[in-house]
Image: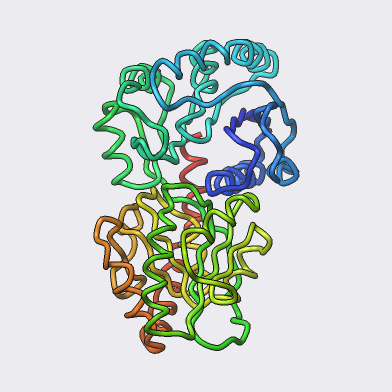
Amino acid sequence: MKHILVINHTRGLHGSEHVLLQSIHGLKKAGYRITVVLPKQVENQGLDEMLDEADTIIRLRYKVAGVHIWRTLAICLYNLPAILYLCRRIRREQVDTVYSNTSTTVIGIMAACWTRRKHLWHFHESADSLYGWHNSMNGLYRLLASYRKNTLLYLSQCQRHEWEQAIGQHPASVIYNPVRLLPKAETIPHTGIRFGYLGGFEERKNLPWLLHSFEELHHEYPSTELWLSGARNQQEIDSIKAQTSLQEPTLQVRTHTLSPEQFYSQIDVFVLPSKKEVMPLVAIEAMMAGIAVIQTAESGLGELMTEGKDCLFIQPNEETSLLTAMRHITDETTRKEIARNGQQLVLKANFTEHYIHDLLQLI
């Protein structure tokens, strides 16, 4: 039985963690033994409870790379005890492959190098400052990625091109993310058109643009509503509300109090206004649930979807593009047609089946 050591950078439940869980499920189904490594000093935000398929869970003190080369080098020194511990476990327990989830997770590649094990490095981020990347780190990552038993996993062709410009070409594969099978959202009856956003509230998500554009739309279509879900705490909720004159019930801002299925059942249009994404699972899941989607063109989804047919793409650097798309999708016939086309495309793509097949081939 092959033994896979899986290393994650958080203990939350974001897009990369859902990919991680799908990976573990596929590997366990194929008969692999799984050991998961998590950062001990980070608060558990739901991931630990979801790792029921893991054979062993190890919690160690380590931090993620990023921001600048000097910080990253300092982090490598800080992580040294965790790396040495992993090297001992890898040798003692005969680990065959080390799998590192996200580009910021560096203890896996270092432990794999020192023990001469195969390493899969799954990059979920762009080589962009919005993801904590700095060009000063190019040389270090070029060196780490050149380890002869390492393979890089990218989420899209455009992401691969971006990283190759930053750190050069190395053995790599592009595997589109697996997607959880969500039931079609049976919309709870309500008046007007309800726009929704689900995800983090960080600066990269560009929520002020969504608020501003929706305010203008609401003046033209007073029966519209905007629901934002994903705030970490009351402080983030208050910060968002302070940026707009919109009031409840027109504007609803909440933490992750609803499951994706529940959230999609209460909206008509999903909006992802981010300045940049790689391969946003949340948009694909909304399409699978049968919801019309407006999403940023700054992502890899343009490789899979057709503008105006499967979804509406918006340009974050064009101020009016979001308002124009929101106006366009207020037409019921257009909205239903885009929702139907998007759902059919996602269901036919069999993302999860292809992902697990390709992952097993690499291992």
Front one among 242 and 66: 242
Q: In which image quadrant can residue 317 be found?
A: bottom left
Which one is in front, 324 or 179? 324
Looking at the picture, does residue 63 appear above or below residue 131? above
Estimate the x, y position of residue 259 in percent, counting from the top left. 66, 63
Measured as percent of width and height from the top left, residue 333 is found at 38, 89
Residue 207, above or below 132 = below
Q: Colour scheme used in the picture?
A: rainbow
Q: Position of residue 287 (x, y in %)?
A: 47, 69
* Residue pictured at 60% horizontal, 31% vertical: 6
Q: Position of residue 168 (x, y in %)?
A: 26, 27
Question: Which quadrant would the N terminus be assigned to in this image?
Answer: top right
- Answer left or right for 270 relative to 61: left
Q: In this view, does 328 lie to the left or right of 198?
A: left
Residue 166 vs residue 26: left or right?
Answer: left
Q: Decide which of 322, 167 is in the foreground and name it.
A: 322
Classify 72 as above or below 103: above
